[in-house]
Amino acid sequence: MQALLAGDRPPVRVSPAGVSVRSRVHEYGGGSFLVAGGVLFYVESSSQAIWTLAPGGVPLRITPVAPEGEEHRYADMRAVGETGWIVALRERHHRDGVTHELVALGAAGGGDAVEHAVVLASGRDFYAAPRPDPDGRRLAWTCWDHPCMPWDESELWIADIGAEPSVGSDSSSVEALQAEQALPALSGGRRIAGGAGVSVGQPTWGPSGELWFVSDAGGWWQPWRAVSGGDPELACGIEADFHLPDWVLGQATMAVMPEGELACRWRHGGRDHLGLLDPRAGELTELSQPCTSVAALCAAGSELVVVGATPVEPAGLYVLPARAMKSPRTGPEKSGQGDWGQAATEPSADGRGSRLVHLPGRRVLAEVMVSTPRPMVAKAPDGVGVPLLYYPPRGQLAEGMPGELPPLVVFCHGGPTSCTDPALDLGVQMFTTRGFAVAGVDYRGSCGYGRAYREMLRGNWGIADADDCIAAAEMLARSDLADPVRMVVRGASAGGFTALRAAARGTCFAAAVSVYGVTDLEALANDTHDFESRYLDGLLGALPDAASTYAERSPAHHPEEIKVPVLLLQGSKDPVVPPNQAADMAAALGRMGVRCDHVVFEGEGHGFRLAATMERAAMMEIDFVSDVLGL
């Protein structure tokens, strides 16, 4: 590892050959591997079991085989000090539904160890982020219940880790867990944060036993800190989001440095920032570094290791000598609507001192061909400011047609509780290198702008998001940044729904592209997986009372509202948006005489994974849009 971070040696694969490492807990997964004590723990994709692999050893399974008629999935593992146990999430699928639990597993693997899967906590609809303290004596975790999503309302709990002696043992100390084969148990559990109308996440223990976490009790996902069992206190009052919605497990945008400072990421002005938060002085100091998008970070001694991307480079592994890279500027005291588009997306400083130690794959585009985003703000019809990133064209269409305004593709992100990422996006560049302009719109409901902006979509999905995308396109046309008669809207998943709704509600778009997008809202609520099965309660209202709203806003129920060509791309094994949604939409448009190109990719799920699929889908989009616009 040290050789990799020093840049002396390329990374080597440590997972077994032929094994796919991926968790499917909550369907979106995350937290699929752990390295503890030099040993690898990983979730094997096909079985969803946890396996362990020591250097020079052979893989050993540590999770028991599920009973007949059940399927067990695991994720988000952590070692419990030196006890010989790890904690993890378990998702049990059985004939009565789905059950979520926190469990402890013997870390050794193989033999009798596989029989020990001890349930530590159950009874809540969902669990996440089980985090033992460094001594293995306390456990923190988050949990929430239907109909809430974790970004709506969740709780942070903490409990003592004790031991229940196994048969023939009278030991109850944590140190004797492994030696005496005692079984771990939790006691004294209490909620320390979160609850009604508050979202919490990322419990992170410091070296002195303090517990950091994020909470939006103040309207933004900000760092909080609890010391020595005391009440948590707000550690940083800057109005910015230091956390993203927990769509995937294992989110890591905070890390505690050896001297107790908190390294953290926050989003402001269309890009991500990194800084060090001094808990004693309450000061947040920004770090000079090149990344505009930060996916994860961790502490490695006095250095900070970051998975990040720039507008011209894909995600790579960077090492930052944190204290040597402090910028004299601190983070923004305010981050209201008025300045969302004012900060540049260029790095806050040149990032000298940071080291790019690994860049997966190869550079696809020369820097001169990359379109970099400009943050802007459009005004919705009701006056709400809508942030967006505008990518000017760089390719032959713009150069070959002087004096003409470029065609525009509006990107609707998914979620809908997600956001436009300022990282290099080859899907965006696919269009800009061909002479298109692109706009990524952070419509109401997007994350990164505080809780109030997220909640503007409550009850308004299919209206506010669609109108915001229309407003962004019309603003760019008025500003002579896009051709008003050659504009297309596209999106994937929830973004596909927004794209279809924007095509129905506005007249500015000449076509729409929906990639595994939602077309029938009530069918989605009835058919989708457990994690999202009550998601629409907040976005639209609870069924059956809101059935008329679901029908009114479902594109498949009102094909007559869409009068422009549509491209539908769908996976045949999508567990989130079942493939019949696209099929029904295509049939409805066909009955109305509207062009609808409907393509199903066999074996693909919610998010295309095969290279051949992604290449074919990309070319279909280009061909469809070019044909519709007459290019």
Image (tube, grey):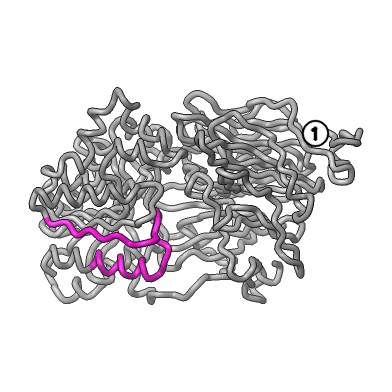
Which residue is at 73% across, 28% downward?
229
Magenta residue span:
595-622
Q: Is residue 606 above or below residue 280?
A: below
> Looking at the picture, how far across and down is residue 619, in whole percent?
27, 69
In the picture provided, is 593 more to the left or to the right than 107? left
> Looking at the picture, how far across and down is residue 343, in whole percent?
39, 51
Camera-nearest residue between 114 and 357? 114
In the picture provided, is 63 more to the left or to the right than 393? right
> Looking at the picture, how far across and down is residue 373, in whole percent?
34, 59
Q: State yes or no: residue 620 in magenta.
A: yes
Q: How crowded is mark 1: few (under 14 residues within 10 Å), some or many (20 or more)?
A: many
According to the picture, the residue beneath numbered tag 1 turns out to be 162
Q: In which quarter of the image is the C terminus?
A: bottom left
Which residue is at 76% across, 70% downward?
56
Q: Is residue 8 above or below residue 143?
A: below
Q: Is residue 244 above or below residue 11?
A: above
Specify the farthest residue to the left: 593
Q: State yes or no: residue 425 in magenta.
A: no
